[in-house]
Image (cartoon, coloured by chain):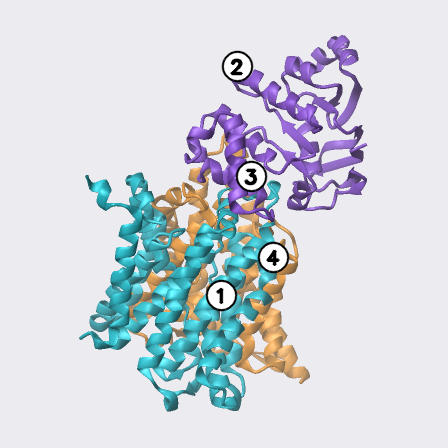
Amino acid sequence: MILTVSDLTKRFGGVVAVDHLSFELKENEILGIIGPNGSGKTTTLNCINGIYRGDEGTISFEGRSIQDMLPHEIAHLGIGRTFQVPKIFRKMTIVENLLAPVLDSPESDAALQQKATRLLQEVDLEPLKDNLGEELSGGQQKILELARILMFDPKMILLDEPFAGIHPLLRAKFHEMILSLHRRGTTFVLVSHDLPSLYLLSSRIIVLDNGRKIAEGRTKEIQRDESVIEAYLGR
Amino acid sequence: MGNLLLQAILSGILLGMIYGLIGAGLNIIYGVMRVVNFAHGEFLMIAAYMVYWFSVLYKIDPLSSLLAIIPLFFLAGMIIYYLVVPRLLKSEDPEMASFLTFYGISMIITALVLIAWGADPRGLRFPYSTPSLRVGTFYLSTGRVIHFVFSSITALALALFLYRTYLGKAIRAIIQNRDAVKIVGIDPNRISSIAFGIGLMLVGMTGALIPLTFPGITPGMGASYTLVAFVVIVLGGLGNPMGSLIGGLIFGLTENISTVFLPLALSPVISFLFLILIIMFRPQGFLGGTSAGS
Amino acid sequence: MVNIFLNRRRVIFFFIFLGLLFFISGPKLPIQLSFIFYQMLWITMAISFNIIYGYTGYLPFGYVAFYGVGSYLTAVLWSRLGIPIILSIIMGGGGGILLSLLFAGTLRLRGIYFAIVNFSCAMALRILIANLPEEIAGGSFGIHLSAIYNPMISYYVMLGVMVLSIVTLWRVSISRLGIALRCIRDDAQAAEVMGIDIAKTRLKAWVLAAFFPSLAGGIDAWFSGIIDPASSFNLLITTKAIVYAMFGGLGTITGPIVGAIGLYTLDYIIWGRYPLLNLLILGVMISLLVLFFPRGIIGTLTRRYPSLRKVII
């Protein structure tokens, strides 16, 4: 198990956003998380990431307990994260955006620049490398966000609504990127409302509602249980 | 020693209520629109000067001057709000922007007063008949007692206003969540301007009566009152106007009791120490308010 | 056509050459030496103020504390312990660094709280120093350094420190530390999630920004020959650093330099003629700057003419 979440609970004032949630992730799996708005999906990711600290429960990554760690420490363990609204550095150039996660790396500036250029070429963003983050389109920003994480060769990536509001062609490109990274050994947690993409990519799915896990199983099982899902997502 | 201590405690309570009221005004302004009014003390100073001139030129005593000061400062508050605050709220960091803007305003006010009336301290001659009251073995300055009584009445009125009237509740609602109130049909801008007016009105009232407690007024006196206001609101909890009153009492008592044991020159250090310690270790103040730390 | 001349390197080198020429020949010029000296001092103050405020967005409202500690430590070490003046100045700089480390814990506070705490520390420090026994720190009368009064050498030491501060800011801005700082300023949460240790990064900038004003305080003590608590911990020093840096444009290198030169010159002229107006003008400037020109001259220029960004750093 690369990731174990056990009894995770997070409250905001009177609201219980995540309610004694437990799940596990095997190495190189792609786990999908679905549920209606407000069911605690993003909060769960935030807890894994270190952005929030859970009120109860434990989270461990590669056997190490991480629920009390700071976000930058968790990033250094090899966990990357994208956000629903891409959190790129708007006033910095694309290249600088890519360099951000590897500033502590002992590699030389030249080597890092080379790596950045290579990544940009792979995602067809190389011609824009001196443009500012805010000058990119929404879809390009999402790609940049993902490319940025790849700079530090993450072991696990948390994706929060990666397909929200992007063009079908770009979506296909994203699928390709995720699958190719998966082939190379990366583990994924995928939060999405985009059911077709979710079914395509995930091997297992958990369904959240009001902070609790109400269903879990292999993709095919959950798919067959469409009625359950429609009932919740249709709300 | 015992006598000195008791005198200090009494002094502390009298001053505490005054400090609390100054803080309450600042707190309302901050709570409602996250505007850090660094010029709070300077407004107090203007009120004090106005009262001085009223008494020198027209022989009007401080309490009567309030009839003019209250509406004037309330109006000034609303005007300043509409002139400055919408612009501030648009900037990248409204808190820091307001901090710096009002810092600038505090300098402007001090400079204007300096130019107009010079740096020499002015003293208000005590206008009422009995300069001091005898209570048991203590002598209390009548001025302070009047100021205390008046401040207490004002504090009570403020509490009733905030908790019993629609407007007051609206103000408290905005302090808790500015965006949410729009849903309930409250116009945050209009209410905020009124809150600003109230905040300035409170500090104007205190400033008008300050010469009863501290007869000497100078152009530079604003700074120490701004500092006091900050300490008080942090003590009582940001965004908790009534908490400022408790904060004021705590601070008044501490400040006065410490003068019994420490040289007078070091007493501002107490204020600063208080501020630093509270912000570092209990940013929500003794009574808690809206979130304050990182 | 203009592009040929606006070749970035050439323009920068030209101005650097001009500047160095001016400051090196300072004592020979028919301008009052103290004017140029304080010009250099304010450039140094604005530049290092920019390192912390321009790059991290944290406003050290008690910035004068570094200057004050530097000047007092220098004066005390020289006059009470007989340590040679240059060494005293360096140790004064060290004192500033120590002070910044002492208050490292405040960097986790929200911006406005940091400003208030920083301010309180500076004011408390001033009162404490003023109330130290006279044998140690001269009480409210201060300390004389007239015995080693040497305007020429202290002038050139200031020049050296100013150049050092500018070079430091430049090196930081192009370094990984600079990138990290700008990331934090852009989106602190994103920076964290990308593995940037916000606390440590801010601390590095904080310590760097503390070093130069402390040195400047010590050199100023030497140049002017006397210090006292009121002038060493004068709140206006912080105010001017803020206004000069903001006026020029935060987050750039040319910004603080332009701001310091322009406004200090203005200040010098006005102070000579209308001393009371000084406070008024500073107040008006701060309010107007924050409300209408938060990016300062350089910032507003680069916004209007983005191509200038290639020339001005």
Vertical order, C132 against B12 (above or below): below
Which-is-in-front pick, marks 4 and 2? 2
- The residue that label 1 is drawn on is C210
Between the C-alphas of marks 1 and 3, the distance is: 38 Å
Same chain letter for marks 1 and 3: no
- The residue that label 4 is drawn on is B236
Residue B170 left/right relative to A186: left
Which-is-in-front pick, marks 2 and 1? 2
Which-is-in-front pick, marks 1 and 4? 1
- The residue that label 3 is drawn on is B177
Q: Earlier in the sequence, mark 3 or mark 4?
A: 3
SS state under label 3: loop
* Contact check, label 2 and label 1, Cβ < 8 Å: no
SS state under label 2: helix
Q: Residue at x 59, y 31 (%)?
A: A83
Residue B127 position, x and y percent, is 40, 73
Dot 4 amino acid type: Gly
Dot 3 amino acid type: Asn
Between the C-alphas of marks 2 and 1, the distance is: 52 Å
Q: Quadrant of residue A218?
A: top right
* Contact check, label 3 and label 2, Cβ < 8 Å: no
Query: Viewer-proximal residue, C299 or C126?
Result: C299
Give the colour of chain B: orange
Residue B277 position, x and y percent, is 62, 64
Between the C-alphas of marks 3 and 2, the distance is: 42 Å
